[in-house]
Each structure stands twice: as C-alpha cells, then as structure tokens.
Image: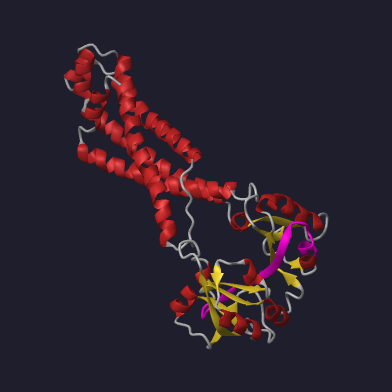
C-alpha cells in the first residue's frame, strides 16, 4: 500500500481517458449484476416450498401438458390441504394475434385463494351469474379504454371456439385490482374467464385443466404436502410436479429458454469487448509513460516492482468500475421492481454474485495488464530514455 499514491497518480494521468474507460467498466458490471441476479433467482427458485401457503401443481413433462379433472378431488383429500382450485391458459389476444393478454379460464373458487386480487361483491356476483362473463384487471381496462358491460371480442392463439374459429366473445362484468400496488402489477393486466364455459366451448380441452393451485393449512408443512400431491400421480401417464408459484414460473421460463445459457452468452460478449477496450487503454497508458518507467528503474525500482505497479494499476481500474457497476445494479433492482408495479422482479445482488464479480474484476484486471506490465518490466533504461 505504500506505493498506492504512485499507482493512483499513474491512473489519473489522463483523467478523460480513465473516466471513459471507467464508464465502460461500470456499464459492463451493471449489466452483469442485473443479469446474474436474474439467473441466480431462477437457479434457486423451488429449492424449498416451506414457508409458502400456496402451491402450484402442473405436469412434470411440460407446462402445456393438461391434467385430468379427477385430480381435483384427490388433491383436496391430501392431509394438510385447505382448499384447491384450478385454471387453464387461454392464450387470448385482442384485435391482433401479437397483442397477447394474460388470460385464464378459472374455477368458481379461484378468487378465494387469491386475496391479492380485489373484486367487489357486485362484480363477483355478476361474474358468477354470467356464463360468458370475464373479470378484467384495472390496468388492462385503462389501457384499452374498456367499460364494464361491453362485449369483448378475443382471439385465442391456441383454442378454437364452438363454431370452429379462434374468435371468442365475452362480456366484461367486473374489474379486479391488485391489493398491493407495489407487487401486484401482474393482476392488473390479466383477464379471468369461466373454466366451465371455456371447457364446454372448445373441443380440445374436455375435462382437463392446465394446473392446480393448492392452499395449505400450515406453511411449514408445504414440502410434505407437495410430495404427497405428486405421489398421487406417481408412475401414471400424468405425473405431476408441485412447487411454489415462483418456482413454477421459473420452470416455465426454463422450458422455453435456457436462461443460464442466454445470460452467459450475453456476459461473454460484454466481457470480451471489455477486455479488448481496457487492454488497449492499458497498453496506450504504458507506452506514454516509457520515459517515466525508465526513471523509476534508474532510481532503483527493480523490474519486479515495475511489473507489479502496472498490474496493480490495471486491477485498481477494474475494481473501481466494477464495484460501482455492481452496486448500481443492487440499487436499481428495487427501483425497477417498484416502477413496474411488481410485473418485473429483479432480485438483490447476493453474496455469491458479489464474489463472482470481484473475481472477474481481479481476473480481467490481471489479464489486460499482463502484457503492458511485462513490456514495462523489460524496458532497457538507456533505450527508453533515448526514446528508442
């Protein structure tokens, strides 16, 4: 540390160049912090169900594989289960197939398990009494300027209706609102329709559901209840996987894309570019200081000390930018979550991500500083002072 002032002075010799390089490093590690947090949350999702009161049961093969209705009663009889409901993906789109809307056919008691969704008594009564009725999230109502009482034409990108087309007609009978505005943005953007009407109207879903949702009596027993539910269908043609809702969502995403591979590929490209950029910066910085390095050797600095000074400068540059970038990612997560009303959930940066980031900073710092440091170590004093 006694040479820190010397290293710092070398680093700040060209302030503009150092600042621009730091911005690049900050951007790279900001991206790393955000993406690695997402990757780690996917990896850790579903490690344990204990502590949650709601479980989701879907097909073990794929989230698009339906389950028989007969499971409903059998799950309800599992010790520890308080109540069970079910739902099915509808795949609705408004006006254009690309204009996808989160829409689900749900059982009559579906709302009983979701206190996060607030529906007035009048709207819930109208929903129960109207076979073609739908409840629409408040955010979605505002987005398309819909009104309660109007007809709602929807296309299903998956299921045909009773007339053989993919055009469906519903009646908006009420709205649903998220009780927690900070984390319930998801509920503001969805449509709920009657599973019974959906099941009767399409020839492709008779007596099957997409997934079951179970409320357990004791959250500390959720793991046991999940295993008991899956044991019902063990060694059958419809084996199930019961997990937390967060884990189920992560599992869906993993079936659509390899999150780890995507994140790794993006970060690989980012850090490869960073190595080229900072490597060029360090090489340029050492070339400009050839005579100064020769003076250091002249006054008694050994070759090894010169090597270490350049390497320390390179590592310090990466550590400065990297720590700021990861810290920014940690601070941005809650802001993004709050701004999206819970629709996006960027996790906080954990100790594992911090450890990986610090190792990357040191590793990249040593890598990009190695060649300039060796060049500085091998400088011939006479040639360097002569400008050769």
Residue at figure coordinates x 58%, y 51% from the top left: 258
Residue at figure coordinates x 55%, y 66% from the top left: 116
Which stretch did the figure color magenta? 74-96
Indicate the quadrant containing the N terminus: top left, top right, bottom left or bottom right. Answer: top left
Residue at figure coordinates x 67%, y 80% from the top left: 160
> Height in image: 373 above or below 197?
above
Instruction: Give the residue furthest to the left.
Output: 386
In the picture, measured across the screen, residue 289 lies left or right of residue 239, that is: left
In the picture, measured across the screen, residue 84 lies left or right of residue 313, that is: right
Residue 165 visible here: yes
Q: Is residue 140 magenta?
A: no
Instruction: Give the residue furthest to the top.
Output: 300
Indicate the quadrant containing the C terminus: top left, top right, bottom left or bottom right. Answer: top left
Q: Where in the figure is residue 324, as x and y percent of width and height? A: 34, 41
> Height in image: 365 above or below 188?
above
Q: 158 and 126: which one is in front?
A: 126
In the picture, measured across the screen, residue 379 lies left or right of residue 326, that is: left
Q: Quadrant of residue 207?
A: bottom right
Q: Is residue 79 magenta?
A: yes
Q: Quadrant of residue 294?
A: top left
Q: Where in the figure is residue 203, as x and y percent of width and height? A: 74, 79
Q: 243 and 92: which one is in front?
A: 243
Residue at figure coordinates x 59%, y 50% from the top left: 45
In the picture, measured across the screen, residue 384 lies left or right of residue 340, that is: left
């Amino acid at each position: 540390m006694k040479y820190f002032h010397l290293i710092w002075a070398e680093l700040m010799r060209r302030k503009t160049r150092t600042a621009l390089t730091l911005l690049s490093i900050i951007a790279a590690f900001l991206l790393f912090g955000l993406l690695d947090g997402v990757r780690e949350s996917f990896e850790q999702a579903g490690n344990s169900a204990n502590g949650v009161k709601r479980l989701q049961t879907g097909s073990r093969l794929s989230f698009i594989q339906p389950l028989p209705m007969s499971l409903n009663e059998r799950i309800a009889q599992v010790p520890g289960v308080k109540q069970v409901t079910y739902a099915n993906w509808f795949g609705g789109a408004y006006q254009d197939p690309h204009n996808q809307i989160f829409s689900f056919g749900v059982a009559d008691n579906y709302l009983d398990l979701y206190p996060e969704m607030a529906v007035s008594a009048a709207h819930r009564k109208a929903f129960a009494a109207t076979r073609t009725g739908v409840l629409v999230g408040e955010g979605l109502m505002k987005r398309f300027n819909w009104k309660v009482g109007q007809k709602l034409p929807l296309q299903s990108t998956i299921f045909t209706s009773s007339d053989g087309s993919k055009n469906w007609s519903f009646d908006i009978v009420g709205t649903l609102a998220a009780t927690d505005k900070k984390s319930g943005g998801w509920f503001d953007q969805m449509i709920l329709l009657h599973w019974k009407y959906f099941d009767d109207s399409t020839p492709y879903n008779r007596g099957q559901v997409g997934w079951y949702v179970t409320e357990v009596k004791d959250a500390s027993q959720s793991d046991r209840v999940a295993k008991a539910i899956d044991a019902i269908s063990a060694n059958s043609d419809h084996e199930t996987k019961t997990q937390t809702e967060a884990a189920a969502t992560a599992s869906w995403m993993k079936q659509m894309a390899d999150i780890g591979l995507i994140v790794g590929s993006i970060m690989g490209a980012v850090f490869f570019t960073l190595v080229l950029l900072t490597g060029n910066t360090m090489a340029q910085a050492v070339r400009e200081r050839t005579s100064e390095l020769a003076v250091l050797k002249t006054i008694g600095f050994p070759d090894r000390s010169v090597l270490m000074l350049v390497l320390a400068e390179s590592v310090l540059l990466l550590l400065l930018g990297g720590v700021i970038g990861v810290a920014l990612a940690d601070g941005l997560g809650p802001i993004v979550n709050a701004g999206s009303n819970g629709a996006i959930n960027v996790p906080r940066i954990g100790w594992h991500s911090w450890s990986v980031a610090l190792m990357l900073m040191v590793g990249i710092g040593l890598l990009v500083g190695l060649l300039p440091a060796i060049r500085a170590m091998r400088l011939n004093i006479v040639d360097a002072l002569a400008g050769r």
